[in-house]
Amino acid sequence: MVEMNDAHAMKTKGARGRLRRFFSGIPVLGWLLGALVAVVLEHYLGDPLVDRIGLDKIPVLFGAVIILKKPLMIPGAAVFLLLIYVIPIAVVARAGKTLSNRLAGALMRFPIAVPALVHLGLLYGAIHIWSDVSAYRVLTLKLTFVAIMLTLSLNVINGYMGEFSCSHPGFMALGAYGASVFTVLLFSSDRLFGDPLLPEALGPFLFPAGLIFGGLIASLGALVIAIPSFRTRGDYLAIISLAFLFIVKSMIENLEFVGGPRGLSGQPNYANLPTVFIWTVLCVWIINNFVRSTLGKALNAVRDDEVAADAMTVNTRRTKMVAFMFAAFWAGVAGGIYAHVLRYVNPGTFGIQKLAEVLAMVYFGGLNSVYGSITGAVSLSLLSEALRPLEIFKWIIIPLLLILVMIYRPTGLIAFREFDVRKVMQPKSNRDDEV
Amino acid sequence: MALLEIRHMTHYFGGLRAVHDYNLDIEPGQVRGLIGPNGAGKTTIFNLITGIHRPGEGRILLDGEELVGRQPHEIAARGLGRTFQDLRLWRHMTVLDHVKMARYSKIGYGLVGAFFSTPRRNREEAQIEEKARELLEMMNISHLADQMVPNLPYGAQRRVEMARALSTEPKILFLDEPTAGMNPEELIQMMGIIRRVREQLGLAIFLIEHRLKMVMELCEIIQTLVFGEVIAEGPPDDIKNNPAVIEAYLGKEIVE
């Protein structure tokens, strides 16, 4: 079936088919190089070009805000997008196809870590140069990375393990407060905790320890719900975890030493873009390793048939417990980073609204898939930023989109797909040559 | 002493007596059958032995070690592999992953390996995969390794389940109606597979089956279960001619 569809797609006449054939066989490396060229162009030629075509400033989010706010400037924004992004990326990716394929092939001969680091380096380079244009872009990127970590970790429970957990913002809150208390107590002078206990210079080095501390607190929280709730399945876990979310929230609201409902501020500025990027990569790498190992696939076995999993020597209880605590750990780390990105947390953030957001990202992107979680988190984060000028209508459009996805792809956009790093980075043979 | 020894196993579901004073000895390499009409308690006996239910009374000894009270996965890891009447395959997993999964208890790399993809993990995963492919080869389904299970024809699904059960490296293989719903051709193939498994791996096999022809051909000793009680036990020829069995199981018409 699949092959037939492919063959069919290859044969399709018309603009789309031709476009697809024109851009086939370009490795990820080629696209990354194209993106890098585009952002460098924007960095150096962006401002002069903006003056020439009569825009106020460089469109921050690919012109989305301009389209919705100032319709008269749409032509200008379109020209800018075309000249800075579309044409350079297309030209570089297509013209450099042979070169980038050869390069990718050469890289793959090294141990897997080498090509992986090269790709990540290029990706980070592009992101960094892109974000240099405005502080808004930096913040959006950081929050998107936090969303990726959250979504992926929730996917471990709701997708890979097939339970419906609602406590993720609760774990995030535990991590956010854990990490915040760690850094504020040790490294910054604050009205709640007084003078720093350690020299401030140590701070950035111990920041990872703070995040891990936050993650471990979240894991402990997970243990508290895991023990009673894994005696039952399905709806009961959803209800217990929802209760847990409210317990965490009201507990923090009533803890005066972390600021109660007013929140906790004064987090040192440790969560810069490279730090957030590295943590996100770590999170994706470790979770992907886990779900691709036989130990991690035991989660799928437990989800699809627990009795059979048990009979095939899988320790189902341990498997569920580990996955739950593991997911909570990463939610906690994401919470810690979130707190240090905003440099302020209050318990109100971690409520139903946050839960709905994360759940939407998981189900939109696709269950049981690392690709899906990244897609879901990135697309919904950026979409929600892009539609900001619509104000209240944003909350009509995004749910509508979700409903459409649920109708046409009930398990999400990219569900049940393995994320094979090696395959992603491989050079691509041109299909036209094969046919 | 027998490989598996069951003494005076009795179990109630609420007020219903499902199994009464059940005894069993399985020697290494022996093929035993368990027959009986629907609802006689055959699958319950399997579930009791493999730990899904905990028997109310009685002892179950594998190699002299007590199994009652252990978790199903512990019992499976000690050498009781099983298949299910209703297959119970994992519908979002590939054939190869099924067979790899059943080696869970033999994985030594632990969580550190799972999280960080250490050399030890890669080595072990490669070994697991090699073993799994050998089993697929043995079941003649190696060409299906990367298929998702729901896409396969029924006979192939049965083979996947058999490969999965063998992958736990059992000492005794419990087969719960391995030919249920099969056509005659698939049935003959399945009998061939069971014979091959026994010859190549030297396993003991404990078989629940409705098709008497198959049980009579394969098994050395057969038990007949009616309402949770064994009414007859012996070699196929004795069972075939036992009036109590004929009456309870085959029905009276056949006698005439």
Image (spheres, coloured by chain):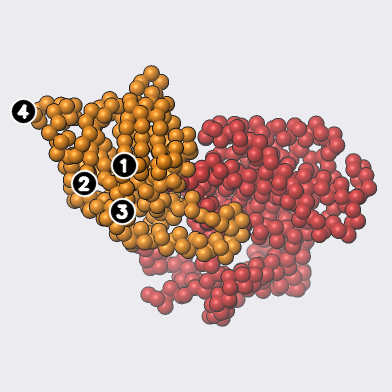
Chain colours: A red, B orange
Q: Is residue B33 above or below residue A434?
A: above
Residue tagged by mark 1? B26
How far is mark 3 from mark 4, CA to CA?
41 Å
Residue labelled with disc 2: B218
Of residue B116 and residue A204, the one placed in the foreground of this image is: B116
The quadrant holding residue A12 is: bottom left
Query: Which badge, 1 or 4, comes first in the chain's sequence?
Result: 1
Q: Position of residue B127 (x, y in %)?
A: 46, 62
**Disc 4 marks which residue?**
B256
The span from disc 2 to disc 1 (Cα, nearest Å) is: 15 Å
Quarter of the figure with residue A221? top right
Which residue is denoted by mark 3 in the rendering?
B202
The answer to whether the residues at label 3 and label 4 have Cβ atoms under 8 Å apart is no
Label 3 marks a residue whose chain is B
Q: Which residue is depicted at the point 44% across and 67% down?
A: A17
Q: Residues within 10 Å of mark 2 (few under 14, many from 20)?
A: some
Tell me the quarter of the picture where residue A158 sits. Answer: top right
Other residues around mark 1 within 10 Å, as few (<14) / some (14–19) / many (≥20): many
